[in-house]
Amino acid sequence: MGSWTAYLISILYVEYRTRKEKENVSFKNHVIQWFEVLDGLLGPYWKAAGLAFSCTFLLFGAVIQLIACASNIYYINDKLEKRTWTYIFGACCATTVFVPSYHNYRIASFLGLGMTTYTAWYLTIAALLHGQVEGVKHSGPTKMVLYFTGATNILYTFGGHAITVEIMDAMWKPRKFKTIYFSATLYVFTLTIPSAAAVYWAFGDQLLTHSNAFSLLPVSGWRTAAVVFMLIHQFVTFGFACTPLYFVWEKVIGMHDSKSMCLRALARLPVVIPIWFLAIIFPFFGPINSAVGALLVSFTVYIIPSLAHMLTFRSASARQNAAEKLPFFLPSWVAMYVVNSFIVVWVLVVGFGFGGWASIANFIKQVDTFGVFAECYQCPPKAPTTAHH
């Protein structure tokens, strides 16, 4: 479903661009964004909806990256609490205001790929070498809440293409995007499935209370390398999630076409500060993931693109003049409409309905247990320093 809706977004982008270029609009210095595509094809109400969901989603995406940074470095250096680390990383991540656009992230994203690959295989091999813990239990989801929290986490994992349009715009040949995206999804499977299966096999139900798998593996040089790589990778991802927010903010205050980078960097600062603040208030990594998955990703990534596609091509003339031809495996418009309607209904019921209920219940439970502004979320109790090591 994730690949399918990414494909729909790419169709709508190409359609919008072709229609605009027929009217001689030039996009030389302008980054096209998803809400502008919705505006051009379907009008202002759609633009408002797309803007609201995408911005909230990206905001929380950035918050999650910040929490993850603090949570990871804690396993290298636990002299400072996780909350203190969040302060420090917030300041470091604020430097992303100086990066003009996605063209400047090419090398970074390539490096990030290498780092995630290393980390995924490290987790797999380390868990297999470690072997199963004594009396390991694999009970699976025992309650409805746990089942749907997991389901929405999966929705979130494969719904990461809220920044699809900005990335397509940074490509020299945007039409090739759909094949690249699909092959990328297949590659991600080779990273996520072996590592998840191996770690779960080794530790079982302990993972329910340890949302960061690093905390279960023994300390070693390999583990430290993996943590450092993930830190750099999360820093880049923070930039990825924030860049569209910067663009939107610049367009709102009318700075998007400014030539001076320093002025634009200053104008972008108000975007970083609330993210920093939220990461300090709610340091719960997993529960935020599933809440975002249920309440925001379901609309941003699954429901809105499917509805937009159905509405854009509802007239016969729009279908005849479509810039992108129908896919070879679904050569009829009726089939396209059936698939899209199924996605809308399925995600509304399972993702937004049940998933929203489960993730909010889980979120409230975490606040009740740890409180807001938690100093050190899910940390092991520290041993007294006088004890013999």
Image (cartoon, rainbow, N blue to C red):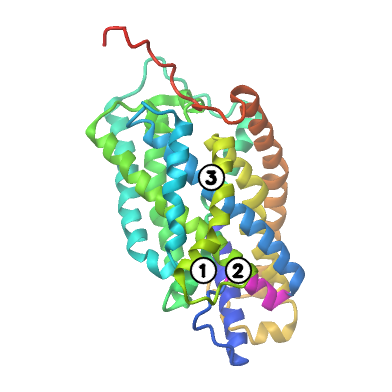
Residue 378 marker: none
Circle 1 residue: 166
Disc 2: which residue: 34
The amino acid on which the numbered mark 3 sits, given as a three-letter code, is Trp
On the question of residue 289 being in view, the answer is no
Whether 163 is drawn above or below 327: the answer is: above
| Distance from Cα at disc 1 to Cα at disc 3 | 24 Å
Q: Quadrant of residue 142?
A: top right
Q: Are marks 1 and 3 in contact (CB under 8 Å)?
A: no
Query: Where residue 63 appears, x then y in whole percent?
Result: 54, 45
Residue occupied by mark 3? 276
Contact between marks 2 and 1 (CB within 8 A): the answer is yes
Residue 176 locus on image (x, y percent): 44, 74
Residue in front for this viewpoint, 285 or 2 = 285
Numbered disc in front, either 2 or 3: 3
Magenta-tinted stretch? 33-42
Q: Position of residue 40 (x, y in %)?
A: 68, 78
Tag 1's secondary structure? helix
C-alpha gap between disc 2 and disc 3:
25 Å
**CA gap, disc 2 and disc 1:** 8 Å
Residue 68 is at least partly visible in this image:
yes
- Crowding near the residue tagged with mark 2, few <14, some 14–19, many ≥20 C-alpha atoms within 10 Å: many
Q: Name the residue rendered at 41%, 48% in the picture.
A: 92
Quadrant in which the N terminus appears: bottom right
Q: Is residue 41 magenta?
A: yes
Q: Residue furthest left?
A: 221
Instruction: Kindly identify the amino acid type of the residue bearing the numbered disc 1.
Output: Glu
Report the label total. 3
